[in-house]
C-alpha cells in the first residue's frame, strides 16, 4: 500500500571557440583600433561565461549550501541536546528561514526552537529561532533566527517553472546520523498536479482545516527524485540558475515508514515557491 510522508552544464570548449570566432568576425568590421577590439572581445566573452544557464550544478551547490540549515529543538537535559526535525533555507534579509509547518515541534511549550548552521569548514552553530509567520494550508513556516545574516536564496519566477525542469534537492536526509552536512539529490519536475494537504496530526483537524480542504486544492510539484526523512523543508533548486522553485514537502512511501529508507520510491513532492513569496509579503 502506498502512502505519503511529509518529510545546464557548462559550455564545451568547442562552443566557446565558436563564440569567440563569431565575436572576432563582428568586431573586425568596427572602425576601432586593434587594442579596443581585444578589450571588447574579452568583456563580451566574460559576460557569456556568467549567464545563469551556464552556472552548472557544481557551482549551484557550492553557493546554495551556505543558505541551507537544519531545524530542530534544543534542551540541555536531553541526549542528544539537539533534536533534529527537518531542513530549511535562508530568505529575506538573511535572518529568515523557510521550512515546512510539519517540521515544527507540536508542543506549544517545550524545548527551544533552534536553527543549526553548518559552515563550509564543517563547524556547527546553533541559532535561537522563533516562528514569525505560518501558512498551514501550504505546509510552510517562516522562522526568524538570531545572529549575523546568512546568504539568501532567490525565489524563482513562476513563469520559469515547468514540467521537465532539472532540479536539485538540498537538505539533511536522515538527520545527524550521517553528520550535519548538506546533501544534494538530482531529479526533474515530472508533473504539476493538484493536491489538498492534510493536517500533520488528527488533533489539528478542526472546523477551520476542514473548511480549508473544502475550498479546493492547489498545484504541487511531483518530482522524479529520491528524498528521505529529514529532507522536509529543504529547497528544490533550478540546477541552471540556483533559484528556489519549491519546498520539499513529502515523499511517496511504499508500505511502512521504514521502507522510505530501505526501498525509496524515487517520487517526492514540493510546495511551489510562489507560496514562499506570498508568505514573505504578508504584513
Image (spheres, rainbow, N blue to C red):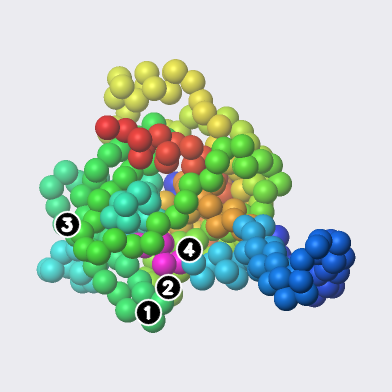
Could you tell me which residue is drawn at 35 percent across and 35 percent down?
Answer: 281
Which residue was labeled with disc 2? 181
Of marks 2 and 4, the one in the foreground: 4
The disc at residue 85 is none
Q: CA distance from mark 3 to mark 4?
A: 26 Å
Determine whether, in the image, residue 217 is placed left or right of residue 19: left
Of marks 3 and 1, which one's residue comes earlier in the chain?
3
N-term-proximal mark, 2 vs 4: 4
Residue on which disc 1 sits: 122
Q: Which residues are magenta?
A: 65-70
Residue at horizontal 85 percent and vertical 66 percent from the top: 28
Is there CB contact under 8 Å for labels 1 and 4? no
Quarter the N terminus occupies: top right
Task: Verify CB contact (< 8 Å) between mark 2 and mark 1.
Answer: yes
Q: Which residue is mark 3?
A: 112
Q: Nearer the viewer, residue 41 or 175?
A: 41
Instruction: Tell me: residue 157, above or below residue 234.
Output: above
Q: Secondary structure at mark 1?
A: loop
* Distance in Å between CA atoms under marks 3 and 1: 23 Å
Is the C-beta separation of discs 3 and 1 under 8 Å? Answer: no
* Residue on which disc 4 sits: 64
Pointer 1 or 4: first along the chain: 4
Tell me if residue 8 comes above or below residue 272 in the rendering. Answer: below
Residue 55 left/right relative to 62: right
Residue, x 32% and y 28% (percent of image)? 205
Amino acid at each position: 500500500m502506498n502512502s505519503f510522508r511529509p518529510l545546464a552544464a557548462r559550455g564545451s570548449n568547442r562552443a566557446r571557440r565558436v563564440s569567440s570566432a563569431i565575436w572576432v568576425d563582428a568586431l573586425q568590421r568596427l572602425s576601432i583600433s586593434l587594442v579596443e577590439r581585444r578589450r571588447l572581445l574579452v568583456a563580451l566573452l566574460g559576460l557569456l561565461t556568467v549567464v545563469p544557464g551556464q552556472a552548472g550544478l557544481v557551482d549551484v551547490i557550492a553557493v546554495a549550501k551556505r543558505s541551507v540549515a537544519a531545524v530542530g529543538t534544543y534542551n540541555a537535559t536531553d541526549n542528544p541536546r539537539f533534536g533534529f526535525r527537518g531542513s530549511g533555507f535562508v530568505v529575506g534579509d538573511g535572518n529568515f528561514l523557510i521550512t515546512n509547518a510539519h517540521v515544527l515541534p507540536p508542543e506549544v511549550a517545550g524545548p527551544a526552537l533552534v536553527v543549526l548552521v553548518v559552515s563550509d569548514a564543517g563547524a556547527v552553530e546553533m541559532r535561537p529561532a522563533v516562528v514569525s509567520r505560518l501558512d498551514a494550508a501550504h505546509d510552510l513556516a517562516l522562522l526568524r533566527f538570531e545572529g549575523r545574516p546568512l546568504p539568501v536564496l532567490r525565489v524563482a519566477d513562476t513563469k520559469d517553472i515547468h514540467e521537465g525542469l532539472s532540479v536539485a534537492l538540498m537538505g539533511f536526509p536522515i538527520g545527524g546520523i550521517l553528520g550535519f552536512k548538506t546533501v544534494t539529490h538530482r531529479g526533474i519536475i515530472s508533473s504539476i498536479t493538484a493536491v489538498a494537504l492534510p493536517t500533520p496530526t488528527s488533533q489539528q483537524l478542526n472546523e477551520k482545516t476542514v473548511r480549508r480542504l473544502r475550498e479546493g486544492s492547489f498545484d504541487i510539484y511531483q518530482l522524479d527524485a529520491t528524498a528521505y526523512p529529514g529532507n522536509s523543508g529543504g529547497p528544490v533548486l533550478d540546477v541552471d540558475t540556483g533559484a528556489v522553485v519549491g519546498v520539499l514537502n513529502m515523499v511517496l512511501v511504499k508500505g511502512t515508514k521504514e521502507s522510505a529508507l530501505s526501498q525509496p520510491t524515487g517520487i517526492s513532492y514540493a510546495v511551489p515557491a510562489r507560496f514562499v513569496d506570498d508568505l514573505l509579503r504578508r504584513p
